[in-house]
């Protein structure tokens, strides 16, 4: 009987670990963001990069293109109607942060895919609510 109970307990633990291993948390990237959903999908588009040389230039451009958003590491100007996207990243001679390039490219391809995090940040006062899609009319 004791052996059977151990088997059941082991089965329950194994099943729990298996389910936990297949949960949505596996979609959290190295950037700390969870992919929520595609706003759109653009697989054939023009992507250009703006290399920002220092914190002052980063802050200046962020104030223009992502006003009121705290904690930015990189940002993009999405132009889905004309299949274009401009990614603003830190020049690697200043700060090498390649993980944000992939994050921003995924915005170019799938739009605003982490709206739940954006809403949470807005409720905490770290970003404006309903930040419009830059250049969406282009």
Image (spheres, helix red, strand yellow):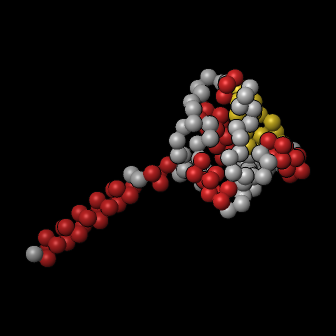
Residue 64 lies in what quarter of the image?
top right
Q: Residue at x 69, y 23 (%)?
A: 82
Q: Is residue 18 left or right of residue 51?
A: left
The spot of residue 14 in percent (x, y) is: 29, 61
Disc count in the image?
Answer: 0
The spot of residue 17 in percent (x, y) is: 35, 60
Q: Quadrant of the N terminus?
A: bottom left
Q: Residue furthest bottom?
A: 2
Of residue 105 and residue 39, the one placed in the foreground of this image is 39
Q: Quadrant of the C terminus?
A: top right
Q: Is residue 44 above or below residue 106?
A: above
In this view of the protein, can residue 22 be seen by the observer? yes
Q: Is residue 42 left or right of residue 53?
A: left
The spot of residue 10 in percent (x, y) is: 24, 67
Q: Is residue 43 left or right of residue 68?
A: left
Of residue 105 and residue 122, the one placed in the foreground of this image is 122
Of residue 14 and residue 39, the one placed in the foreground of this image is 39
The spot of residue 112 in percent (x, y) is: 62, 41
Q: Residue at x 73, y 52 (%)?
A: 128
Q: Is residue 106 left or right of residue 49?
A: left
Q: Residue furthest front?
A: 130
Q: Residue at x 74, y 46 (%)?
A: 74
Q: Residue furthest left?
A: 1
Residue 86 lies in what quarter of the image?
top right
Q: Residue at x 83, y 47 (%)?
A: 63
């Amino acid at each position: 009987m004791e052996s059977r109970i151990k088997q059941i307990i082991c089965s329950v633990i194994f099943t729990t670990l298996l389910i936990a291993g297949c949960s949505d948390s596996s979609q959290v990237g190295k950037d700390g963001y969870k992919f929520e959903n595609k706003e759109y999908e653009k697989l054939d588009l023009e992507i250009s990069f703006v290399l920002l040389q220092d914190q002052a230039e980063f802050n200046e451009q962020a104030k223009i293109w992502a006003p009121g958003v705290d904690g930015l590491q990189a940002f993009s100007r999405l132009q889905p109607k004309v299949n274009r996207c401009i990614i603003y990243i830190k020049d690697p001679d200043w700060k090498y942060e390649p993980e944000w390039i992939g994050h921003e490219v995924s915005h170019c391809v799938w739009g605003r895919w982490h709206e739940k995090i954006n809403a949470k940040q807005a409720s905490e006062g770290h970003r404006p609510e309903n930040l419009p899609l830059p250049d969406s009319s282009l």
